[in-house]
Amino acid sequence: MIMVVLAVSLAGCSKYTTPRKVEKRITEGTWRITSFTVGTDVVTLNYALDNFVFDNDGQVEVRGGSTVDGTWELGGDKDPALLYLSFPAVDGLEYLSDDWQVLEIKKNLMKLKRNESGNSTTLVTFAKQ
């Protein structure tokens, strides 16, 4: 009996998160990039002034040196959840335009990994302000 309860509780644990949880968390508050790495290159400072506000209707507003509008969308019922971001080529925001695996999302933290092939890994961490 104890083994069954343990197996059920472990099966409920997941390294990734669901699209429903991402949708709920991402639209709560203002987010800032606290870490952005492309392979071994750290580019976090390029986004130091940017604040991201994700609306329920799939719009994202970036407030920083200038205000830029983009879009966001979740990819179906994937595990891990996929977050699609699209921005115009302004202030380096185009480098965020891609599909991202949501590695983790909590009330105040979101970790993304670019869905890419090749030897390089791109990771972005957002923290809620």
Image: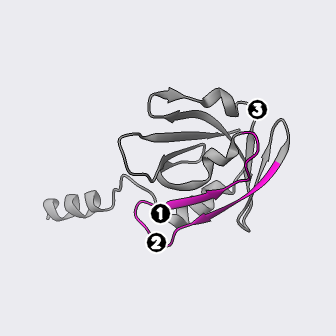
**Which label's residue is closer to the chain start, 3 or 2?**
3
Q: Is residue 8 left or right of residue 59?
A: left
The N terminus: image quadrant: bottom left
The structure residue drawn at horizontal position 72% and vertical position 65%, both measured from the top left corner, is 56
Question: What residue sits right under mark 3 in the picture?
Answer: 49
Question: What residue sits right under mark 1 in the picture?
Answer: 18
Residue nearer the viewer, 117 or 2: 117
Q: Is 93 located above or below residue 58 in the figure?
A: above
Residue type, numbered disc 2? Asp
Magenta region, residue range? 68-91
Q: Are marks 2 and 1 in contact (CB under 8 Å)?
A: yes
Q: Is 15 located above or below residue 50 in the figure?
A: below
Residue nearer the viewer, 6 or 62: 62
Asked which quadrant contains residue 34, the reply is top right
**Which label's residue is closer to the chain start, 1 or 3?**
1
Q: Which of the two discs, 3 and 2, sits closer to the camera?
A: 3
Q: Which of the two discs, 2 and 1, sits closer to the camera?
A: 2
Q: Residues within 10 Å of mark 3 (few under 14, many from 20)?
A: few
Q: Is residue 117 left or right of residue 84?
A: left
What separation in Å lies between label 2 and label 1 (alpha carbons)?
A: 7 Å
The structure residue drawn at horizontal position 46% and vertical position 72%, both measured from the top left corner, is 77
Q: Position of residue 126 (x, y in %)?
A: 60, 41
Residue type, numbered disc 1? Thr
Residue type, numbered disc 3? Leu
Question: What residue sits right under mark 2 in the picture?
Answer: 77
